[in-house]
Image (tube, grey):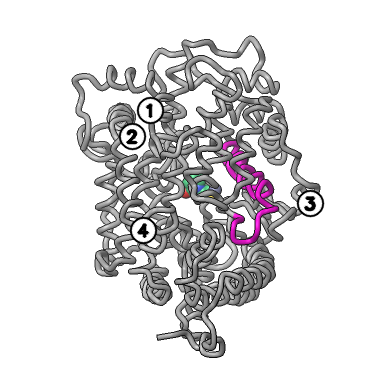
Amino acid sequence: MLPISVHAQAKRAPTAADAKAFIASAEARLTELALRANQAGWVAATYITDDTEALNAEASKNYAVAVQQLALDARRFDKVKLSPELRRKFTLLRLGLAAPPPGNPGEAAELTRITTSMEADYGKGTYCRQAPKDSTRASTGGAAGSDCLQISELSRILVDSRDPATLLDAWQGWHRVGAPMRQRYARFVTLSNKGARELGFADAGAMWRSNYDMPPDQFAKEVDRLWEQVKPLYVALHAYVRARLVQQYGPRVVPANGMIPAHLLGNMWAQEWGNIYPIVAPQGAAPTYDIGALLRAKHTDVKGMVKYGEGFFTSMGFAPMPATFWERSQFTKPRDREVVCHASAWDIDDRDDLRVKMCLDVTTEDFITAHHEIGHNFYQRAYKDQPFLFKGGANDGFHEAIGDAIALSITPSYLQQVGLLDASAVPGPEADIPLLLRQAMDKVAFLPFGLLVDKWRWQVFSGETTPASYNKDWWDLRARYQGVAPPMARSEADFDPGAKYHVPANTPYMRYFLARVLQFQFYRAMCQASGYKGPLHRCSFYGSKEAGARLNAMLEAGQSEPWPETLYKLTGSRQLDASAITEYFAPLKTWLDQQNAGKPVGW
Ligand code: X8Z
Ligand code: ZN
């Protein structure tokens, strides 16, 4: 069946020139609608009210419906011979949305209402130890009262407390945020699948997997291949951390050869474990520095933390962020209103209006996050001269890897160079294992979590996981990949995936798994470009214009070509390759294997 719009032109077959004109007009229209959606999205995320939520839903719907309509209209060019560049724009247009709306206008509006409301509910989430008077506000009600804790306070408890009961209370309190989303999530899955099928994909998960310049099944195999490369490192870290947690909490809390309970790892989702480094630090080793403590000692404020991130990029030859970045960003949590605290980077006008939205504290974790977010902004600015459909990461994993690749250069000698560490306090090679362990607690621990979030969503979109087993299948994946168990009984009355931001916000997550691998590839390539020779983990390319030029060549290409070509520009390789991360951690792997000798490994 031909789309209706073709009948008017049925007199002659569409040509490449028609296709070019179609794309030019599509890009102009989407540029305008994206600006509106970004503006509405920004106010909705930095001032959550019913009105900003409604305005955001409206603007997102207008953008999404336009993309969807254009992608459907574009089918009339499917058989026209086009340049690879123009063909790529059509492909990207069809893949442009994480939640493609169905053609039915009522259903399209319902879909965006559901996504905006789930994200807002996540942002408003609170745990009130004493039930508030109005019991309908139990988990996501109004401004947090004095006895109500939000995600940042609950996360703080998971970092600081060493009391299993206190930790459990914070963990279960936050996980209540998911349950009220369960039904909406099921409806959301139905509607986005419908939109994906109208575009010709098997389901919305297959659509997500199609965004990597290879067939979707091949992409699924690629991530499994990478996981097999890094799994021995993860399993060794898991065994070592578990043994130290047994020492800390006893075998009744932590089974010596089983899974680690999810509330003991210093992070609400047990995704990064660096916050409990003090529990697992090598016995007898001199304590290493804590970057948060170094920053506080220098009275660095949150803006100052972001300045370090910017300073790294400018040292490599990038221009500083524009003044509006500093004026319009949200660096700290406002006291007088509710906001979505989950960190994000924004490119409001697809040119110079770059911003971050964060709720920073002066901690090591947030110092890394500041680098992560500003990395997005430098990427966005580097590709600002690309046409609309090529503005984006080579793939979404690239976007997530830039700031992190930079932050891998935060070595002892870098900290000395920027004046955060006194020369007398710079540790020598004896600190390699403690520093690598600290790093692995974040980077390596994350890998299985990064993999499983979308393994779960792929199953949900394909129908393999139905609402009847949402929670069970979530925890099955967490058991299988992470070796992490829920700290208390869970049931299908819960919806624990909803307690992780990216599920209610519908942000695909495999990008973070890719980024964990890619950032080490980028880092190794920039170390080489800077002329560094020596063990990979001690390299810092701060100040290297050569590394900056190579990085910029990759960034400015945006998504104008298949990502392997863009990867080649920086690394000289066209492959995703975990050998850089295993090389970086090789000395730690040897050490972990020694520590684990004769002890249980695996779960
Ligand atoms: O969501 C993020 C960034 C925003 S793009 C802060 N990250 C993932 C997460 O927090 O779950 C970065 C690491 C993984
Ligand atoms: Zn990010």
Determine whether, in the image, residue 266 is placed left or right of residue 368.
left
On screen, residue 337 above or below 220: below
Kindly report the distance in space between the C-alpha atoms of the residues bearing marks 2 and 1: 7 Å
Q: Amino acid at mark 2?
A: Val
Q: As rendered, which of 340 and 95 lies closer to the eye?
A: 95
Position of residue 537 measured from the top left corner of the image (x, y, whole percent): 49, 22
Q: CA distance from mark 4 to mark 2?
A: 26 Å
- Residue 69 drawn above or below residue 538: below
Q: CA distance from mark 1 to mark 4?
A: 32 Å
Q: N-terminal of the two: label 2 or label 3?
A: 2
Task: Using the numbered discs, state the Cα–Cα distance from disc 3 to disc 4 in whole angstroms.
Answer: 38 Å
Q: CA distance from mark 2 to mark 3?
A: 41 Å
Instruction: Give the CA distance from mark 3 to mark 1.
Output: 40 Å
In the image, what residue occupies the spot 56% across and 62% down? 86
Q: Which residue is mark 3?
A: 324
Q: Earlier in the sequence, mark 2 or mark 1?
A: 2
Helix, strand or loop for the magenta stretch, by majority:
helix
> Can you give x and y, in whole percent of width and height, for residue 362 in the image?
63, 37
Which of labels 4 and 2 is toward the front?
Answer: 2
Of 321 and 270, nearer the camera is 321
Pointer 4 residue: 496
Q: Quadrant of residue 493?
A: bottom left
Mark 3 or mark 4: which comes first in sequence?
Answer: 3
Classify 10 Å Cα crowding around label 1: few (below 14), some (14-19), many (20 and above): some
Three-letter code for the amino acid on which mark 1 is drawn: Thr
Residue mark closest to the camera, 3 vs 1:
1
Amino acid marked by disc 4: Asp
- Circle nearer the N terminus (4, 2): 2
Labels 3 and 1: the sequence-earlier one:
3
